[in-house]
Structure formats: structure tokens, C-alpha cells
Amino acid sequence: MDVVGPKISEQLGPDGKKLGIPVIVIIGFPLLVLLIVLFLGFGFALQHQQVDLTKTYSERTAEFLARDLADQVGQLLTPAAEYTDTLAETIERAKCSNADCAFSVIRAQRDVASTIPAQIAYLLFGGTNGQLYSVYKRDQSDSGFLGTVESPKGDSSQLIISEPGKAARTMPYDYYQAGWYQAGMVRAEPIWSAPYRGKITNICKLGEGDSWNLQRVVRVNGIEGKPLGVLAVNVCLTRASLFLQSMIGKTVEKITIHTRSGESLLVGKGQLTIVPNNAPVKSADVDQLVYKEVSLTDPSLKGWRLAVTLGPELSQQAIWDWKHTLGLLAGLLSSIALAAVAAAYVVDPVKRLSRAVVGVGALQLDTPIAVTTRVRELAFLASVIEKMRGVLHGNQTRLEFLAYHNPANGFLNHAGLTRAYVELTTKPGHIDLVLIKIRNYHHIGGIIGDVALARIMARNIAIVEKELEGSVVGCINDNEIACLYPSEDGIDSQHIRQVLEWMRAPHDDDGINVSADICASVSTKQNESDRFDMLLRRANAALYHAEESRSEDAVWYNPEVIQDLREALEFRGDIARSIANGEFVLEFQPIVMLKTGTIEGVQASAVWQHPQLGPIKQNKFFSVFEKNGYIRDVGLFAISRSFEFLHRFKMRHPGRKLPVCIILSLVQLIDPLFIERVTELQREWSIKGGEVVFVILKNAAALDDPQIMRALGALRELGFRLAVDYAVDSAGLSRLSSVRSETLVIRPALQRNIEHPGPERTILRSVCRLAAELEMSSLAVGIERHAVLAPIIDCGCTYGMGPWFGNAVSEQAFLNAYSEDSALPAVPGNGLRA
């Protein structure tokens, strides 16, 4: 006998028979429970999804309808607004001095009624003298203005209403107290009035409804900018009401337009209702309906909003059908016998669906859902989940693209470059960040347009991607390109120089020859802790140095030079003390008459002999000192030393003339004590005005400040001469004549690619001819190569300056060289040329 006892499946019952547990209970019952739980879970999941989709669909439908209706309402009112504003401009151009003049313009509109928008019911003008005149339609369908409303001469307390075929009638009226007149006089910009019922005429009345109107109100100025009166144009709301009422039905329960003045136009149940200011619009009976509100996009309707309330059919959310669930459960309970067979068709698809639901919930959307089953419901669920996965995957891909790319041009943005840099850091080797900037992007965008600038950026990116194979390229902004270049030994300077030359090469852009002024910098990953933003800051520091030094080659980031230079330029110490300690000196560079080769002048520029960094040229610190104000002290020092130099030159070379050019900052001209100090220095060193030329290298279009113009006028009265940088726009050209500049400065940018005949040389010749016709001389600065010398002379330029004729040297070195070789040939070999 078994001492352990019988097995559980073989235990005896009371009658001695063996007890057993059916297999259907062991397998079928858990399977049935599992199926019930799974179906309930999927049912709730689908119900939740259906509720969310229904809600989202209803809200998007309401928003779409609201935007569409807002656009159509704008199309009904915008023509009237544009006509009103144009009519106001017509009255102002007439330079009227009284209301009668404006009345005549209004009266003339009756002859051109066919050109007036059909929405307009009458035109009204009220003058500041109390007189009013209006023309109106007798009916909305009229094509012309047959009626008139006007106040008698000398009596502004009543109106005379005249209409063909009817006796004239009068009514008391004080439009000084009218809302449209008060609003028009208070506001300078055109506005729409609040909705109101018509009092003078019933033009807008339709059937038994109210005669609701809107007015477009514009204040009109007469001569000398004084207010002449208020122009108002009436628009009947009947047309808009009929249009909006036609939209009311099962889909739309109510349409509400909130005006800028606070009143609301409520369209529903076949009528238009005006809700007063601050009154509630959304009633309790529609709290459960979908409500969406959008702004009217038309500029003339700024501050207006249109709201749509959907009807119950679209607002009602999906409700769980418990009867269907009970039927499903009953069917399952009655099919216990078939559970084992059904399990073979259900278990595996359910497992796949379960994994798919978990994957979709966890946003694991890359793997498609593949469920093969003969069970229709499961196949439907699988297709629904697959569609959900596809939609979510598409949205995820789109959001990821927008996160890392510029939506306007599709290029990588800062975030995309950062991610690419992180991926590159996982590989061995060097990583260089090349930062490329279009320096003349303001010129290109202002003259040719932002679209052309975008095309140039795309062209430059294509060049970089082709020439720097394996690089990752993106945009930092609309004028800077960033390139991440992985390599074994680092980027080659000769290679990047060639890439920059191709970018600078002139090319045809939509029929216009374009040349981009390019500067570039390079920063290198130095250790594993370097992040992308750190490389970008280093590259920006080097780019700043490249811009200031006008470098043609890319500038590599050098922390020991660039960072110290930045600290020096951002100096917060006592500049006056640095000047007193002799840290600032002047250097002098010859200016040559191009046709004769003789020295006809000299330019003085300051040099900062920094105790740690050594010499820092004026072009490095000039713009920074303009921003922090130190240019006032350094500029006054340069003027004082230039006057002293001129005094010594006249003593050494009596009878000779050598005008000294001194660069001025606009900050100096704004200084109220500047003219007084220059006058004192002129008297101290016995300087005649014609011996000094003050040069303003800012674009001439910037010379629009009254204080600057007064300072320039004072310098001319003291006898000093002026030279201004060339400006390519009409405003800049007008400034050239207003400041009465004697010399026009031609910067190196206008000297590019002039070695061969082409549009660049034609532009330079036009500039020189312009200077000649304005009785001005022209000065080409920055001449470095002999190849450009002949074209510059051929184009008619008067003077030249640059390293080709001589570098800037100390005062004594210049005076000695001038004594030895005062007449310089216009070819290599002169004594001052470095």
C-alpha cells in the first residue's frame, strides 16, 4: 500500500468511485476567462480611442469651419475697409482745408458708384466745423447712391434727408455726440464701429428684422496735418447675416462674431442678434456642445474673433454600448464547447495584438503589425492598430524632422547639428567645426531679396557638401553655415581656402550677377568633454576676428590670441589713463593721385600698443569702442595728434600741402562737446580747415540724425572737408548730397573681380562717374595688387590708398620717406611701399 496516499486525480468519493477534473475545466475555463478579459480590455481601449478620436474630429471640424467662415466674413467686409481707407487717402491727397472740399470728393463718388463695393450702403463725412454730408442707397440692391443727408449751412443741430420722388425731411442730430465721430477723432488708425441699429434710414432693414449696421471709421487730416473730420462708410450686416444663417443647421448650432468693441453678433435659429458689451454669449443649453473660436486674419479686422458651436450630432461623444458587450459575453458562454478549437485561431493573434498594443503605447513604431487570423474581429482590430501605428509613426517622423531641421529650407538647425556632433564623437579621429558667414547679407537681402539670399545659402551648402565629403552641414541662421567635418588628420587649410574661393566666385542668380562676401573660421574638438556649443562659441570668436581683420582665409581658433584680444577690446578700464601712458600712437599711410603717382594726402589711424598683446590696429578696436563709448577719448586723441603732425609737416615743408584724413565715428558726432573741442585744437595748432578731411566710413544712409547733420554742418563752417562712404540705395545717395561730401570713398568690396571686363568693372565705372557728376573726387582704399590698379584708373577713380602704395608707418618714418621720395610712381618700387 502507498504510504504517501492516493494522487489528487485518483482520490475516492463517498461511494468508492474515483474523482476526476475534466480537461475542459483545466484548459477551457482559464482560456475563456482570458478571452473575456482580453476582449473587455480591447473594448475599453478601442472605446477610449474612439472617444478621443471623436472629440478630436469634432474640435478640428469646428476649427476648420470657424476659419473658413472667418475668411468668408473677411471677404465680405475687407473690400469695404479697403475702399474706405483709399477714399480717406484721396481726400488727404486733395489737401482740403475745409469740410466742403471733402464733401465734394464724397459727392463725386455718386458718379462712379459701379466701382464701389456692393456691401456699402452709404458714405458719410462729418467735419470738425459741425457740418455733415452723406450719400446713401435707398435699398441694398441699388447700384447707385440716390439719397443725401446733410446739415444746413450754419446749423449743425439737424439733418436734411433728401431722396428722389420724396419730400425732404429733417431730424435733430448732434454727431459730436455720435460714437462713430468720437471714435474716429480719438483713434489715428481706421477702425470698425460697434454694430448698431440704423436711425437715419432703414437701408439695411430686411423684412421684420432689425436694421443692423457696421461703420468703417477713418480720421482724415487736412493741410498741415490738422484733423479735417471723420469719414465713415456704412456696411449692412444683412448680407453677412443671410450668409451665416445659411450655415446654421444640423452641423452648426450657432455662429458668434466677437467684435473689437466688445459687442457680439450672434447668428442662430434664423436671426441675427447683437449681444451688448460684456454680456454672456455661451448659454447653458450648449455647454456640452463643441465650441471653437478663431481670430479673423484680415488686418482691417484685427481684434475680431469668430466662434462656431457645433450641433449635438457632431458634439456628442461615442458612448460604450453595453448591450453589445453583454451579447458578446453570452455568446462566449454559450460557446464553451468550441473554446478549444477557437483558441487555435485566437491565442496567437491575441499575443501579437497584445505586443502591438504595448509597442504602440510605448511609441515603438518602427515595426509594422502583422497579425494573420481568420477571426474577423481580430483582423479588424489589427488593421485599426496598424493604422494608428502608421499615423503615429508619420507624426513622430515629422516632429523629429522639424526638431532637427529648419522648416523653411529643410537644412539642419542647431539641434540637428548638435545631434550629429554627438554621433560623430562616438567615432575616432578629428572633428572640425567650420563656420562660414555671408558678410554682405544685408546688401543682398536689401537689394535682391531674402529669397535670393536663401538660394545663395543653398548654393554654398551644396559646395561644402560636395567638396568636404563626409561632412554634416546645417544653418545657424539665415547668413551663417556650420559644417562638422570628421577626418583623421583635421581639415586642410588649402582645401578650405579653395572652397571659400568658389563661394566668392560671381554667379548668375535669376539674371543678376551676384558676388558673396565670405568669411570663415574653424574650431577643433580638443578633448572628449567638448560639446557642440563650446565649439560653436570658439568658432564665433574666431569668426569675429576674421570679420574685423577682413581675412580672406579661414581663421583658426587660437585661445591664447583671440580670447586675449576679445578681453582687450571689451576693456572696462580707464582709456584716458592708457592714452596718457603712451599706449596709443598714430600711424600714417600715403594717399596717391593715381594718374601722376604723387602723394596728395595721408590717412592717420590709431594703434593701441597693448602691454600684453602688442600692437592692435584701429580697425580691430574701432567698432567695439563705438559701442562702449571709448571712441570719444581715442578719437579726440587721434584728431589732436593729427593736427600736431600737420603742424610739424608745414614747418618742415613750408609751401607744400598734405591734407590729413581722419576717420570719424558717428558716436563722436553725437557728442555735444565735439565741435567745441575740435575748434580749440584747430586754434591751438593753427590748422586751416582745408588741410583736414574727416572721413565717415558708415553707410551714408545712416546720416539721418539731426545732431549728426548739425555737427557735419559745423565742421564745414570751420573749413574742414568731408568724405563719405559710397551708399548703394537712394536714401544713401541723397545723404551724399545733403552732407556736401567732397570725396566719395570706394571700399574694397567694389573692387572685386575688376581685373577683367564685366559687370563689376561697369559698376565701379558708374560709381566714379557719379562722383564726377556730383563734383566729388573718388578715393579707392585697400589697393593691394597691381592687377586692379589699371582698371581703377581706367574707371576714372581720382585717388588710391593701400598696401600697394605703402603701409601705415610712424610719423617720423613717413616724414623721412616723404622727404626722400615725395613723388611716387604709380608702379612698384616707390620708397613708401612695403
Image (cartoon, rainbow, N blue to C red):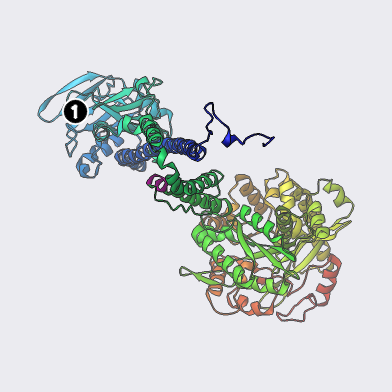
The residue singled out by tag 1 in the image is 206
Residue 736, position as x, y percentages in the image: 57, 58
For the record, the magenta segment spans: 376-381
What kind of residue is marked 1?
Leu
Q: Taking 146 as reference, is 823 above or below it?
A: below
Q: Taking 88 as reference, is 682 above or below it?
A: below
The stretch drawn in magenta includes residue 612 = no
- Residue 518 showing in the rendered view: yes
Characterize the local packing of mark 1: few (<14), some (14-19) or many (20 or more) Cα atoms within 10 angstroms.
Answer: some
Residue 13, position as x, y percentages in the image: 54, 29
> Which element carries disc 1, helix, strand or loop?
loop
Residue 509, position as x, y percentages in the image: 49, 68
> Residue 180's quadrant in the figure?
top left
Identified at 21% across, 39% down, the residue is 110
> Residue 732's quadrant in the figure?
bottom right
Identified at 44% across, 37% down, the residue is 43
Relative to 223, 766 lies left or right: right
- Residue 220 showing in the rendered view: no
Q: Nearer the viewer, residue 378 or 493?
A: 378
Q: Nearer the viewer, residue 97 or 576?
A: 576
Relative to 504, 667 lies left or right: right
